[in-house]
Image: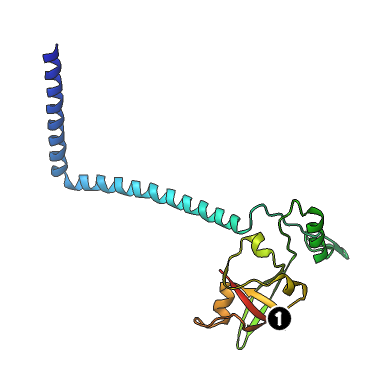
Amino acid sequence: RQAGEGRREGGAVVNFVMIFKVAVLAILRNKTRSLLTCLGIIVGIAAVIAVLAIGKGASTMMLAQISSMGNNLMMVFPDWFRRGQVRTGMGAGQTMTADDAEAIVRELGHLVRAVSPNINVNTQLIRENKNWNCRVSGVGCDMPDIRNWQIGDGRFFTEDEERSYARVCVIGTTVLANLFEEDESPIGRTIRIGAMPFKVVGVLA
């Protein structure tokens, strides 16, 4: 019985070698067909890898965008109001003030880490002979912590500057590219937001 098993094992090895030789000869005899078969396998594998990579990249980008908005973030908007026969949309009311933000900190300080009022307008930014139309946000000094903003150059404005209504601003990289020269530092420079001058104290990363 042992001799028989040895012969079977030896036969299996010989058969495998013969099958391998036959396969190699078949590939060499049909080079074009073999090349096309290999090309199809390579393209198929590459397509699967590309699809998986694109899906992973899109997922990472979405998570990064959500994270940039801030973790555990709650946004509170004023209600709508009616002007004549026209009903405005949510957030169009003028019923909320900066005092409301301070009240949230005062009443819910054990639950809320940071609060910032926020008002947005679309206006023109001007510096010397350059201008740029963009969205301008009036926010509190805690906004970088709330929205996970990183400062690339300079600093964010302080609580004292916020309370004294100091005319300081922090710009983004798009505004930097459109209002300043490539090798020019904007820190300490003055720009006009609408008709009002503001000193640039920082640039967001």
Q: Is residue 96 left or right of residue 202?
A: right
Q: Is residue 161 left or right of residue 182?
A: right
Please state the total of marks drawn on the protein image: 1
Please identify the quarter of the rendering in which residue 135 is found: bottom right
Placement of 143 over or under 202, stated as above or below: above
Q: Nearer the viewer, residue 54 or 166?
A: 166
Quarter of the image with the C terminus is: bottom right
Quarter of the image with the N terminus is: top left
Residue 80 screen position, x and y as percent: 82, 60
Residue 121 screen position, x and y as percent: 72, 71
Residue 65 screen position, x and y as percent: 58, 57
Q: Nearer the viewer, residue 65 or 141?
A: 141
Q: Which residue has dot 1 on it? A: 194
Q: Nearer the viewer, residue 165 or 64?
A: 165
Please identify the quarter of the rendering in which residue 34 is found: top left
Q: Residue at x 16, y 37 (%)?
A: 23
SS state under label 1:
loop
Q: Residue at x 74, y 51 (%)?
A: 111
Placement of 151 over or under 133, stated as above or below: above
Residue positioned most to the top:
1
Q: Is residue 97 visible?
A: no
Q: Is residue 87 left or right of residue 44?
A: right
Q: Is residue 62 left or right of residue 45?
A: right
Q: Residue at x 77, y 54 (%)?
A: 109
For the residue marked with disc 1, what is the amino acid?
Gly
Q: Is residue 40 visible?
A: yes
Q: Residue at x 57, y 77 (%)?
A: 176
Residue positioned most to the right:
84
Residue positioned most to the bottom:
129
Q: Determine crowd level at label 1: few under 14, some 14-19, many 20+ residues with C-alpha closer than 10 A.
A: few
Residue 103 screen position, x and y as percent: 82, 59
